[in-house]
Each structure stands twice: as C-alpha cells, then as structure tokens.
Image (cartoon, rainbow, N blue to C red):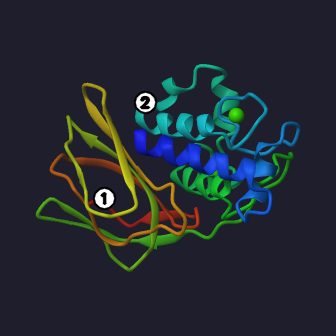
Amino acid sequence: MKYLFILLIATSTLADTLPQHGLNLPMRIARKPGIQTFGDMNLNEISGEIQDFELFVNYFLHGLDAFTINLAGQTAISDINADGKPLTVADLVYFKRVIIGEALPYPRSSGFSAEHDTTTASLSLNDYTLQINDSVMIGGVYILAGGNAMPRLLVDDFQMQKHYDGLYTRIIIYSFEENTSFTGPFLEISAPIISIEMATETGNPVKIDRIP
Ligand SMILES: [Ca+2]
Ligand SMILES: [Ca+2]
C-alpha cells in the first residue's frame, strides 16, 4: 500500500505540474470539478484523485462497508468503464488507465453506455499455482477465497492486497504502472477459491469458463 501511495503521489504531481506531459490531458479532464465523469469515489466532485482510487481498492478488500458517504452514489459512480456494471475489476483497471493517461474518462451523462468486448479465458490450478491459459493478457484480478488465505504473487509490476474477515479472504491484484499485464502462472494459493473476477489490460471484462 505504501508503494502504491508513493506511485500515486508521483503520478498526481507529474500531471499537475507538467502541462506539456502526455499524462496531463486525461488527468485534467478527470480531475476538473464540474465535469461529471465516473470515478469520483469519495463524491467530492473531483474524479481521478489518489483517494478515489484507494477507496475503490478498499471496496475490493472490505466490500460495500468501504462506502460510508453514500452507498448508492458511490456504487453508481464506480462504473468507470461505463458499461452499466458498477464495482467491477474492469472498472478498476480502466480507472488506473484514466489516471495515468492511457485512456480518457467517460462522461457521466444519462443514457450513455460504452461497448466493451468480453474476452473468454480458462484457468487451471496445479500444485497450488493458479494459471491463466489462452495467452489472455490480464490487468487485474479479484479472488474470494475460503478461510485465511496466504497467497503469493508470482508476477512483476503488480501488487496484491488481501483482507481476511474471519470467514473469507478477499484478494485484489492490480497495477499502477503503464502497459502492465500478465498471463500464465500468476499466483500461489492453497485456500479454496470461491470466486474469481478478471479484466484485461485494457479494462475489458474477462469471462472465465470455470473456477479451478
Ligand atoms: Ca474524488
Ligand atoms: Ca463497469
């Protein structure tokens, strides 16, 4: 978390102080008050802040309890890839892309719906190693595991956070760097996997054929 925070600070400072920098245009749009875009998770009318991203990560760790300001409003504004489905890993990945300048934020106007292709991937679990087959390039993963899981991340340039609530462990894997993705073996985990959600590196949803 500390590393993420430093990265976010660095990104924010870059975008705020270097108007000629390529990262700046989407950040300016995302952060400008008065323009309604998705991603203002703390509902302070500024989208794409460090706090907005951290709050969304906290949702994956703590569920809806992370939203203490306005549950309905914070849920609705999390549909950052504007496909009509809030609170998804695809939204988190797309949010990162918006903040670092890889993608533009979607306007939050009524009736607007963005089209995102859904990719299908298969997963396998051998010797406690979870693997993505099909060479699908992944940008984010959320796993709900039974018990107090102790997973180990096997890929570079990504970070993992987890929270055990006494019954389940919620695990979120994401990156805050440009052009980051992985495929193949990515996680050691011995706890039973209850559900998995994934998104591609571009923030499109991934359909998983079955949970291994
Ligand atoms: Ca905000
Ligand atoms: Ca969405």
Q: Residue at horizontal 25%, vertical 25%?
A: 166
Q: Residue at horizontal 66%, vertical 46%?
A: 13
Residue 148's spot in the image, x, y percent? 20, 35
Secondary element at image label 2: helix
Residue 68's spot in the image, x, y percent? 58, 19
Q: Is 207 above or below relative to 137?
A: above
Quadrant of the snapshot with the C terminus: bottom left
Residue 193 appears left or right of 111: left
**Kind of residue indicated by mark 2:** His
Q: Residue at horizontal 74%, vertical 47%?
A: 16
* Residue on which disc 1 sits: 211
Ranked by sequence position, the earlier of labels 2 and 1 is 2
Q: How many marks?
A: 2
* Residue on which disc 2 sits: 62
Task: Evaluate if marks 2 and 1 touch, with contact meaning CB atoms under 8 Å apart.
Answer: no
**Number of the front mark, 2 or 1:** 2
**Kind of residue indicated by mark 1:** Ile
Tell me where residue 130 sits by quadrant: bottom left
